[in-house]
Image (spheres, rainbow, N blue to C red):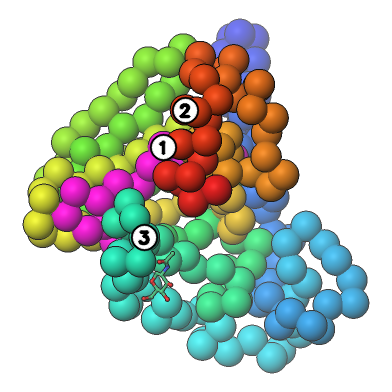
Amino acid sequence: MSTSHLLLCFFVIFVARVISDPDPLQDYCVAAPQGAHTIFVNGAPCINPANAEPSHFTTSALSKSGNTAANPLGFNVTLTNIRNLPGMNTLGLTMARVDIAGNGLVPPHTHPRASEVTILVKGSLLVGFVDTTNRLFTQQLREGDSFVFPKGLIHFLYNLDSKAPALAISGLTSQNPGAQLASSATFTTKPSIPDDILKKAFQINGQDVSRIRKNLGG
Ligand SMILES: *[C@@H]1O[C@H](CO)[C@@H](O)[C@H](O)[C@H]1NC(C)=O
């Protein structure tokens, strides 16, 4: 192997290390229930491994469909987390169940700490992400198709069918992926981003700002 190959190899290993949660130093770290915290770590502290049970590694959290009716955009995301699946603590992953009503939309958003792979279980979806050069990568998914959203990039999922609901299951490469909606992160922050900033950033007037805020429930 040449020096340049070796360097490339090290670089790839370095990048792979940077893009996922830290590796656990033990087989597992079943998350201790909240309230039991006397120390804080990057993640949740573990229970005594001798007290770990198979039930810590299983969940029915994704078995039931989320209610999409309450959301004006018609989507509902159900996540695994250290409360409903304590055995996933420190393992660097999360699963999500995404229910989307007819013509429902999971609006443009990012996960600052995770890449995401989605498999469309039911229905038809138009999905896409935007890279840092503002190039849009979009694809129409049929049942059984998968799509990946690279870490940190803005992406969306839209149900093309006006009636039939869609169901997608996602895997994310962090136990705490985080989610930031482009619309809420600009127009419904607390406290509000000053109007002058939004007017200039989006090249709109004060009435536009108020209307968008109101429409988004801000
Ligand atoms: C998502 O669905 C669950 C289960 O029906 C419901 O409890 C929750 O309120 C819904 N979330 C939103 C934001 O509508």
The residue at label 3 has a CB less than 8 Å from ligand 1: yes
| Residue 54 vertical placement versus 69 (above, below) | below
Q: Which quadrant of the structure image shows residue 49?
A: bottom right
Please, what is the three-letter code of the amino acid marked with disc 1?
Pro
Residue occupying image coordinates x 61% and y 56%: 176
142 displayed left or right of 45:
left
Q: Ligand 1 lies in which image quarter?
A: bottom left
Q: Which residues are magenta?
A: 99-112
Give the x, y percent position of residue 151: 51, 36
Please, what is the three-letter code of the amino acid marked with disc 2?
Asp
73 displayed left or right of 123:
right
- Residue 101 located within the stretch drawn in magenta: yes
Q: Which mark is residue 208?
A: 2
Please, what is the three-letter code of the amino acid marked with disc 3?
Asn
Give the x, y percent position of residue 144: 16, 52
- Residue farthest right in this picture: 38
Q: Earlier in the sequence, mark 1 or mark 2?
A: 1
173 displayed left or right of 189:
left
Residue occupying image coordinates x 66% and y 77%: 30
Which of the pair 98/120 is nearer the observer? Answer: 98
**Which type of secondary structure does the marked residue at label 1 adopt?**
strand
The residue labelled by disc 3 is: 71
The residue labelled by disc 1 is: 108
